């Protein structure tokens, strides 16, 4: 099995790569990524190939698909989350949306069998519905959400029996990765709780669906290796727990206090962030048969393990914040 991961140097792509290489001897993984946020963390493995290239470079994408005879494309590459996208919305739009159709067409032309697209559950916008299904209207409130959603019908129009595809709308991912991010809700709260014994909670009443990164990897493994013919073109939510930010903070507080035997202070701060939504993942469990095994609490515990064993150091450094890294790239004219 030859798998190409766009964005394979990122938070999820890196964790997934290590996960798959550990589990399978006969898989070849090609990481197609310009690696805006660094590549010092990438694995060394005879079944791993790093193509440091830009997804906007369609000729290179075409050549890499031919070179490695790719079976499956997993498209993770994007300028991720709302504030980072908005640093340079024109370039972000090209990366997240305008080059997408070319990637799909080139994949089909090169006889790729399966194209898996990572959309986002934030395409639903703000909703009071406690069980947002895949049929819920898309009401994105930011450009990031909008263009993520606009890619979905683009993929669908190229699918057929020989070129199959599936769309995943993941919740916010949490937990440890070799390419760590501390700008995601559970990870931010855990980092500050562990390092400062203090958490600032902006708002607190907003709901956020989450998915443990270990389940995210298990799901992509499931989709890569299983026959999806019956589900060609289907859309699936992927998230386990819908909790308020305040509830997440209390889970973090409990786990970190138990681990460090020190008190963690909660500080509530007013926020104008109205983003609040809950998703149901009944479809992916009932139709695909995929079951979630890991919780938010598991993610917090794994992060604490990696603080303690030295895998995560200097964690308050801005290098773990995509928006800060990209600001520096823009300042140095390295993001064009």
Image: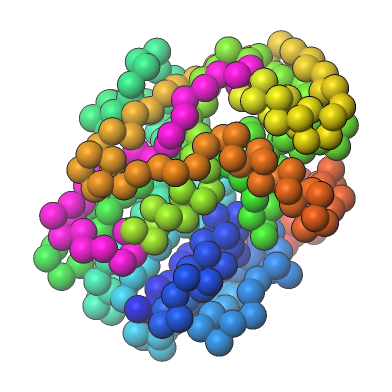
Q: Residue at x 24, y 71 (%)?
A: 113
**Could you tell me which quadrant the N terminus lies in?**
bottom left
Position of 141 relative to 286 (above/below) = above
Q: Quadrant of residue 123?
A: top left
Q: Quadrant of residue 140?
A: top left
Identify which residue, 269 or 64, lies in the foreground. Answer: 269
Magenta residue check for 158: no
Q: Position of residue 33 (x, y in %)?
A: 56, 68
What count of labels does the image hold? 0
Identify which residue, 82 or 212, lies in the foreground. Answer: 212
Magenta residue check for 227: yes
Q: Residue at x 44, y 44 (%)?
A: 293
Q: Position of residue 286 (x, y in %)?
A: 22, 39
Position of 243 relative to 156 (above/below) = above
Q: Residue at x 51, y 73 (%)?
A: 21
> Would residue 59 be seen by someone viewing this image from the given angle?
no
Q: Position of residue 37 (x, y in %)?
A: 69, 59
**Left or right: residue 323 compared with residue 166:** right
Describe the colour scheme in one phrase.
Answer: rainbow
Q: Position of residue 108 (x, y in %)?
A: 25, 71
**Left or right: residue 259 compared with residue 218:** right
Q: Quadrant of residue 254?
A: top right
Position of 225 relative to 329 (above/below) = below
**Could you tell me which quadrant the C terminus lies in?**
bottom right
Q: Residue at x 81, y 49 (%)?
A: 308
> Would residue 209 be seen by someone viewing this image from the given angle?
yes
Residue range in magenta is 223-247
Identify which residue, 51 or 181, lies in the foreground. Answer: 181
């Amino acid at each position: 099995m030859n798998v190409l991961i766009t964005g394979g140097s990122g938070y999820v792509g890196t964790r997934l790569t290590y996960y798959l290489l550990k589990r399978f001897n006969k898989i070849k993984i090609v990481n197609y990524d310009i690696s805006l946020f660094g590549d010092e963390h990438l694995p060394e493995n005879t079944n791993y190939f790093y193509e440091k290239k830009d997804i906007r470079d369609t000729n290179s994408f075409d050549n890499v698909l031919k070179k490695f005879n790719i079976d499956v494309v997993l498209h993770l590459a994007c300028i991720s989350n709302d504030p980072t996208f908005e640093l340079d919305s024109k370039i972000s739009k090209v990366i997240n949306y305008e080059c997408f159709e070319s990637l799909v067409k080139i994949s089909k032309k090169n006889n790729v069998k399966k194209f898996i697209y990572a959309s986002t559950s934030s395409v639903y916008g703000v909703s009071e519905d406690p069980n947002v299904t895949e049929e819920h209207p898309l009401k994105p409130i930011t450009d990031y959400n909008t263009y993520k959603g606009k890619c979905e019908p683009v993929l669908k129009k190229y699918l057929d029996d020989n070129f199959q595809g599936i769309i995943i709308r993941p919740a916010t991912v949490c937990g440890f990765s070799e390419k760590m991010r501390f700008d995601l809700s559970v990870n931010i709260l855990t980092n500050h709780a562990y390092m400062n014994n203090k958490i600032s909670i902006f708002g607190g009443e907003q709901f956020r669906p989450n998915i443990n990164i270990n389940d995210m990897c298990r799901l992509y493994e499931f989709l890569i290796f299983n026959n999806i013919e019956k589900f060609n073109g289907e859309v699936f939510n992927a998230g386990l727990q819908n909790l308020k930010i305040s509830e997440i903070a209390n889970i973090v507080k409990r786990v970190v206090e138990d681990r460090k035997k020190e008190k963690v202070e909660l500080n509530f701060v007013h926020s104008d962030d109205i983003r609040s939504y809950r998703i149901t993942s009944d479809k992916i469990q009932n139709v695909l048969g995929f079951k979630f095994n890991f919780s938010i609490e598991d993610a917090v515990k794994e992060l604490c393990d990696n603080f303690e064993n030295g895998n995560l150091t200097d964690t308050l450094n801005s290098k773990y914040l995509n928006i800060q890294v990209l600001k520096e790239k823009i300042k140095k004219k390295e993001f064009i």
